[in-house]
Amino acid sequence: MKKAAPLLLLCLLTFCSKAEETAAGKFSIAVVGGDTFDPVEKVLSTYSIPHEVIDITDLEKEETFQRFGAVFFPCGMEPPVHEKISIIPSGNSIASVSLKGKFRDTDSELIGKNISLFVKKGGAAYFSGFAFKHLQAAFSPFEFFSNHPHLGEEGRIEARLSGDLAVFCGEQQTAIYMTHAGWVTVESVKDGEVIAEGKYLTPIGEKEGPISVLFKRGRGEILYTSYHNTLYSDFRRFNIYKIAAHNLIERTAGKAEEQEILAKIGDAVHKGEHVRTYRLPVKSGHNDLYITAESAGFQADVLSASKKIIESRDSFDKELNFSIEADDDSYCFVKIFPRKNTYFSRYAIVSAAGMRALPYYIKVPLIALIILAAAAACFMVFTKIGRPGYISKPRRIF
């Protein structure tokens, strides 16, 4: 039994280590490839976000989704019709038209079912433009004008921003430009948070509706956007990191138990940038700001609405927490400064209002102490049991 004690202690410590590793989470990202109208793959590469390109036919297999924490479904991910057929001319006429061997129709119903399972189990998914049909097959969240999705005309839109998108962009209105006709126009959504909307022209007159929407389904999250024409705007950047940093965002939001979450965003400081600034909401009374990063080492400054420094901290860890007492409902600014080796390292920021029965900075050490105490108690018990002459149970003498 004496030999079993160190083994038991090792098992407990290994369990704790694995629990920490699971919480941090291995988060793999997939992009459905093809000659897409939405160059998500290019943007992810520019942002130094590791990802794997998969084929649309892979979506028919449930095991494909089990390998990833996030999947991007870009507009135009299905090959266009002209790439699916082979035409053989004969003089001024066509001799034959046939389907190319490598192309086949995908099972939209099966893909929709797999997407639904993936999201409900905690996956994060991005859909843009024409990829709406796969989201519609999974959850049917959209209503369209005259039951027709492709009504948008080319032109400028003054988009109204709200929620986390407005927090990220630091503004409540921005101009976007649709570069082609036939873009997807949504009339309304079911059980979703509209984070961008606006008025635009269609062949049946001026219409108004959602442009970007967030959906919660089960334990997972979905972002849909009709706008994907820009490569490097804050609008685009928010969309990418909302999904690519989903694991960090949700882990950080988990610290705000018993509190009202006011905002939760993900981002990274890119090379050539010295600082990233965000305007986060706070409510009258007690508020907490939680920051979690992929890599250790960053500086965070918190400023009041009048841009006076409330607190500045340089962290050599992956986490920072700030407490703020506000006189009324307002906002604060958060500035993130990177170290040289932490460029492109993703992080999450969560703003939460209200008091917690047990603050996060006390709860985590307390749990660690309880685990260590349990391990020490087990060690002592098994060490005592293993001593020569010690009998764990009375023996009956016949």
Image: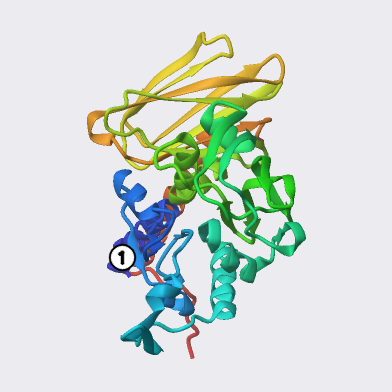
What amino acid is found at the position of numbered circle 1 in the picture? Leu
Going by the image, does 16 lie left or right of 192? left
Residue hosting label 1: 7
Q: Nearer the viewer, residue 1 or 234?
A: 234
Query: Is 274 located above or below residue 371 in the figure?
Result: above
User: Considering the numbered disc 1 on the image, is that residue within a helix, a strand or a loop?
Assistant: helix
Query: Is 238 located above or below residue 217 in the figure?
Result: above
Q: Residue at x 42, y 17 (%)?
A: 312
Q: Nearer the viewer, residue 235 or 156?
A: 156
- Name the outermost residue toward the front: 92
What is the x, y in percent for residue 332?
57, 20
- Report which quarter residue 222 is drawn in: bottom right
Q: Is residue 262 visible?
A: no
Q: Nearer the viewer, residue 50 or 262?
A: 50
Q: Residue at x 48, y 23 (%)?
A: 334
Going by the image, does 123 lie left or right of 79? right
Q: Residue at x 23, y 30 (%)?
A: 340
